[in-house]
Amino acid sequence: MQNIQEKFSDKVKHLEASAIREIFKLLAKPGIISFAGGAPDPKLFPKKELAEIAADVLNNQGEVALQYGVTEGYAPLRQWVIDRLTNQGIISEKDATIIVSGGQQGIDLAAKSLLNPGDGVICEEPSFIGGLNSFRCNNAEIYGVPVEADGLDTDKLEELLKAHSNVKILYTIATFQNPSGITMSLEKRKKILELAETYDFMIFEDNPYGELRFAGEDVPTMKSMDKNGRVVYFGSFSKILSPGLRLGFVSCDPALMERMIICKQVEDVHTNVLSQMIAYEFVTRYDIDAHIGKLRQVYGEKCQLMMEMMDKHFPSCVTHTRPEGGLFLFCTMPEQYDSKAVMQKALEKGVAFVPGATTMIDDKASYSTFRMNYSTASKEDIIRGVQTLGEVLKEVVGE
C-alpha cells in the first residue's frame, strides 16, 4: 500500500503523540534529572503489601481474578468507591459509578458518549494533554479559557459561552490543576455551576489529585454541589496507590452512565479484574488514609524544597505557582522566550521539564511557560536539578 496515511480517519489523522511521552525518550541519557513526568514517587508504592495480596488473590480467588468481569467493575471495589465518595459528600444516591481502566479512559468514555463532531468543549489553558487529545479525537471544537491565580477566568468563560452556542462540555481539573497546580476558588466553582444551568452544558470535573492536599483548606468539589446531574466526576487510584494498576472511577447521571457502559464494552469489555481485586484487598486490609497521609507529607516536603530552590536560583523574572497539593507547579518566563528552546538547553545540562506548548490547545505555538513535577525526583536531585536549571535560565533570560 503506497500511502496508508490517506486512509486515516478524521478522528486520528491530526493527533500528535503526547509530547510528554516523547520527552521520556530523551531521558535515556544517563544522569538526566527529570522534572518532566507526572508520576507518583515509586519509592512510596506499597510493593511488599501488594505482592502479598496478589499472591493471596491468585492462590485463593484465582478463578474470579482471571475470569471475565462485569463492565461496571468488581462489585466490592465499586461499592467501596461509592461509600467513600458518599462519605466525603461528593456523590449522592442519584449518581451511578463505574470502575474504569484509569481516569483517562473515563474522560474518553464520557466524551464519546456526549460529543458529536463540531460540538464545543471549553478547557482551561493550560490543561491536561490526555483530556485535550480525547476531545480532539472526538472531533470537538476546543475553546480555551485562561487559568488565573484562583482558577479558570469565569468572565472570559461567560464571554465564550455567549459567543459559541455549540458548547456542550466544560473540562476542568479544579483542584491542584495539571499543569499549573492551582486550585479553583469556591466562588468560581459556584459560578461555573450557575453558568452551566444558564447555558446548558455539562461539567467534566477531573480530580485525580484531590486527596493529595498538603497545605491550605479543602474546597468542596463541584460534584458535591451539583443538584441537576450536570457534573461528571472522575477519580483515580493512580496517584494514591499505583498508576500501573490502571484503575479509575467515574460518577455521573445514570442515563449518561448507561451510554458509557456500552462504550466501555466496545473498548475493553471490563477493567482488569485482578487489579481491582488487589486494590480492594489493599484498601480493606490496610489504612488507606494513613498511606495517603504519608504521600501528602513527602510531596509537601518536596514541593516546598523545589519552591525554595526556585526562589533562590531562578532569575527574578521567572515566576512559579505555589501549589497546596498535587504533583505539579508551573513556571512562567518573560513572554518573548520559548520554553521549547530552553528545554533543549536544559537537556544538554542534564535537566528535563515539560514545555508549556504541550499543555495548550494550539500546541504548535511558542509559549514562555513550563511544567515542573516534584513528586518523582529525590530531594538531592531537586536541589541539584533546580540549581542547574536556574543557571540555564539565567543564561537565556538574564538575572
Image (spheres, rainbow, N blue to C red):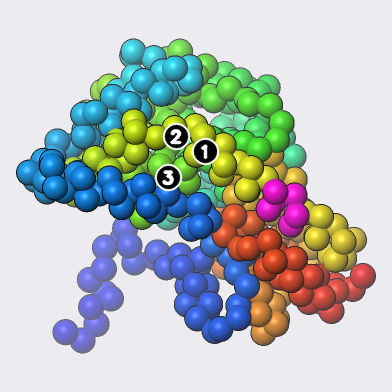
Question: Which secondary structure type mostly characterizes the magenta part of the structure?
Answer: helix
The reply to whether residue 337 is visible in this rendering is: no
**Which residue occupies the foreground of this view, 105 or 144?**
105
Residue indicated by mark 2: 288
Nearest to N terminus: mark 3 or mark 2: 3
Against 76, is 386 above or below?
A: below
Mark 3 is on which residue type? Leu
The answer to which of 374 and 104 lies nearer the viewer is 374
Whether pointer 3 and pointer 2 mark residues with C-beta atoms closer than 8 Å, the reply is yes
Residue 225 placement (x, y as % from top left): 52, 16
Tag shown at residue 292: 1
Question: In the picture provided, is 243 more to the left or to the right than 158?
Answer: left
Q: Which residue is mark 3?
A: 241
Give the CA distance from mark 1 to mark 2. Answer: 6 Å
Q: Residue at x 33, y 44 (%)?
A: 247
Q: Say which element carries label 1.
A: helix
Label 3 – label 2 distance at C-alpha: 9 Å
Q: Is residue 399 left or right of residue 385?
A: right
Q: Are marks 1 and 2 in contact (CB under 8 Å)?
A: yes
Distance CA(mark 1)–CA(mark 3): 8 Å
